[in-house]
Image (cartoon, rainbow, N blue to C red):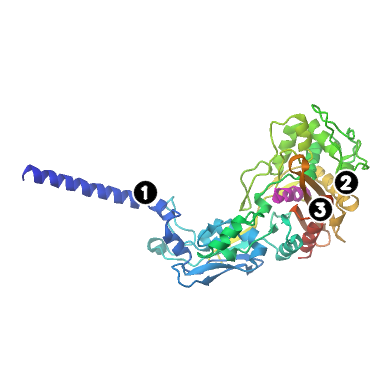
Amino acid sequence: MNKTIRNAAVFSLLLVLALLVRATWVQAYKAQALADDKHNRRNVIAQYAQPLGDIIVAGSPVTGSKRTVGSDLAFKRTYTDGSLYAAVTGYSSQAYGATQLEGIYSKVLGVPPRRSSGGGTDSRLKNPVDALTGKQQEPGDVLTTIDPAVQKAAYKALGDTKGAAVAIDPKTGRLLGMVSTPSYDPSEISGVTDGDAWKKLLADEDKLLVNRALRQPLPPGSTFKLVVAAAALEDGLYDSVDTKTNSPDPYTPPGTTRPLENENKSAPCENASLRTALQYSCNNVFGKQAVDLGQDKVRAMAEKFGFNDSKQDSPVRALASVYPTGMDKPSTAYSGIGQFDVTATPMQMAMVSAAIANDGVMRSPHMVSKVVDADGDTLQSYEDAASKRIVSSSTAEQLRSAMVTVVDEGTGTNAKIDGAEVGGKTGTAQHGENNSKTPYAWFTSYAKDSSTGKEVAVAVLIEDSGAARSEVSGNGLAAPIAKKMMAAALKS
């Protein structure tokens, strides 16, 4: 064999070896990554090749599927009462992906089985042969904890206002209702030709796609005073909610000449007890308490309740509610009334009331009870939520008593429910530089029916109702909505 032929043969052999190495690398090491790539249209085609599984509320599906025409995507997602449940389901779009429960459980609801990166296979596979053939399995379902009566009560009461509401069963952590308004219908963006509807949603100044219940933390105002009161009682700063505090009115924090005043100038806030201070929402009392305790102790209590948690899942992840660090004493005082850089989601403030209602123990909030396969067999169960003690039983009992006073005789009278124990706390949070914009209205509460043993905790945020500034208050705007949600939960 001459030299030219020999060199050509060696070069050709090297090319073949390179191709074999490349093919082995792609098939053995990159196969899963390529299969998972968002640009791999085969996944989308497979996902919508058959009707999707459903998201279930109280035994009935609130999702569905219908056949498409003239597309390689055979089916697309539909929604029953889409605007009502959008904050729960999210959307599943052939063009724009999936969010919330639709996204978290997309594998169960419709994506075909595949090998996992750990060498296992999709949990829906019952026949091992299907792992080799890639056979499409029948989709499973996601069963939620949502109570349709509570959900409808919240949605109807919120109407066209910009706001959100959350209801939790304190004993179990089950989310009974979650609404964000104004809402949208996920059916309008579920296809591949819904670009105009998508652009309209993105351009809407009310941010309809944002789940305000979980994803838009805002200053909680005076509802945060419950956290400060809990810190004061747990620390022993005051023996009980009826002990007089050392609180001048107005109170001027150290390091500033600007006094922290009360909205109600005639309220008996000077040296008021915690009960009276919550009843009349006395800023001087809680601003001074925050300074007396120090920001570290207030932050520690806030974090017990769930603030500063960047992994708060239900299973949809909430943005972290924040209690800040590095404050001076004037800022610490304002943090004690839920201002400065303190922010919270309605979910977070519902968690505060739920822990107080449940004797100081917080159950992890969750909106899914179980995930099942096509045969109804359980793939995952969330019925036993984790729990942790936030405050002592004594502190919780005293805070409940003070919250009842708020509703019976204080700033939260619009939340009263005949025949039920109702406790709450109002909040009106400043908005804009020098409070130049319309304030936010808050209400966080709980209700118990001793005859049935039913309980519920609720938080309502009104971001913008269109009402005049003088008409914005937690009792006037948010408490009536909470009342309707609580009443619905106790009757269900």
Q: Quadrant of residue 188?
A: bottom right
Residue 406 lies, with reference to residue 291, above or below; the image says below
Which numbered marker is on residue 375? none
Which is more foreground, mark 1 or mark 2?
2
Viewed as shown, does residue 116 lie left or right of 185? left
Residue drawn at x 76%, y 31% as measured from the top left: 294
Which numbered marker is on residue 29? 1
Residue drawn at x 64%, y 47% as measured from the top left: 319
Q: CA distance from mark 2 to mark 3?
A: 24 Å
Label 1: which secondary element: helix
In this rendered view, identify the residue nearer to me: 332 or 199: 199
In this rendered view, identify the residue nearer to me: 79 or 60: 79
Q: In terms of sequence position, does the residue under pointer 1 or pointer 2 come before the other? A: 1
The residue singled out by tag 3 in the image is 468
Q: CA distance from mark 1 to mark 2?
A: 64 Å
In this rendered view, identify the residue nearer to me: 464 or 163: 464
What residue type is disc 1 on? Tyr
Is residue 258 magenta-colored? no
Query: Badge 1 local density, few (<14 within 10 Å), some, or many (20+)?
Result: few
The residue singled out by tag 2 in the image is 279
Q: What span is in magenta?
A: 345-356
Q: CA distance from mark 3 to mark 1?
A: 62 Å
What residue type is disc 2 on? Gln
Q: In terms of sequence position, does the residue under pointer 2 or pointer 3 come before the other? A: 2
In percent of width and height, residue 265 lies at 91, 41
Is residue 353 magenta-colored? yes
Viewed as shown, does residue 104 lie left or right of 83? left
In this rendered view, identify the residue nearer to me: 461 or 301: 461
